Amino acid sequence: DQQVKQNSPSLSVQEGRISILNCDYTNSMFDYFLWYKKYPAEGPTFLISISSIKDKNEDGRFTVFLNKSAKHLSLHIVPSQPGDSAVYFCAAKTSGYSTLTFGKGTMLLVSP
Amino acid sequence: KAGVTQTPRYLIKTRGQQVTLSCSPISGHRSVSWYQQTPGQGLQFLFEYFSETQRNKGNFPGRFSGRQFSNSRSEMNVSTLELGDSALYLCASRRGTEETQYFGPGTRLLVL
């Protein structure tokens, strides 16, 4: 039973436009969410996170939105750049526990 | 500050053998977690160590074990290797009080 779902395996966007990556979760105990970016043969790189007490967090070109009632979060990248092309993983956890539960990832391709 | 390091980066073993992977966390980080990434199952939590004690364990057979040393370095051992153990093994570290985990580059294990 997948507790964190990224329903889009891939997304293609043109350079300069907005990329929106989505993530849904089912476990109500999750209260902290993270996005990681991963290139092939490398470990995931932390991008941005959000606690359940917030509904938005921004860091430069990256913004994460959390809709607790819908159990949905999204990552917005504006403007998208070719270097953003990678697999993006959504992860969730419960405070006090270290275990991260990951989605299957969305491959983002930003074309020039 | 140096990131999480993992050795070796690549490893080829045959069925029935055992393997030991090593992880050095970011300086000052006392928590080390291990994850397995496979194409079919995605990223799955193996276990977490904090101050030399295993705090959490994922749903993996007893062939998978680990330990942590007093300097926070961690090792993971897989005994009686099976073909299905071929995967990217990722180590992540965090400060004990923070939520965000930072990943190493991973060890790519191929079991023949």
Image: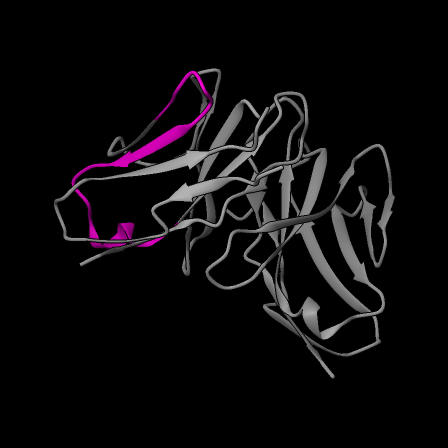
**Vertical side of A89 occupied by B2: above or below:** above
**Total marks drawn?**
0
In the image, is B110 to the left or to the right of A78? left
**Vertical side of A57 occupied by A99: above or below:** above
In the image, is B103 to the left or to the right of B80? right
Q: Residue at x 19, y 45 (%)?
A: B81
Q: Residue at x 61, y 50 (%)?
A: A45
User: B82 or B5: nearer the eye?
Assistant: B5
What quarter of the picture does the C terminus of chain A occupy? Answer: bottom right
Q: Residue at x 50, y 56 (%)?
A: A42
**Vertical side of A97 occupied by A26: above or below:** below
User: B54 or B105: nearer the eye?
Assistant: B105
The answer to which quarter of the image holds residue A15 is bottom right
User: B10 or B67: nearer the eye?
Assistant: B10
Q: Residue furthest left?
A: B16
**Vertical side of A93 occupied by A80: above or below:** below
Which residues are the magenta region? B67-88
**Residue A58's spot in the image, x, y percent?**
86, 49
**Residue B29's spot in the image, x, y percent?**
57, 26
**Residue A68's spot in the image, x, y percent?**
80, 41
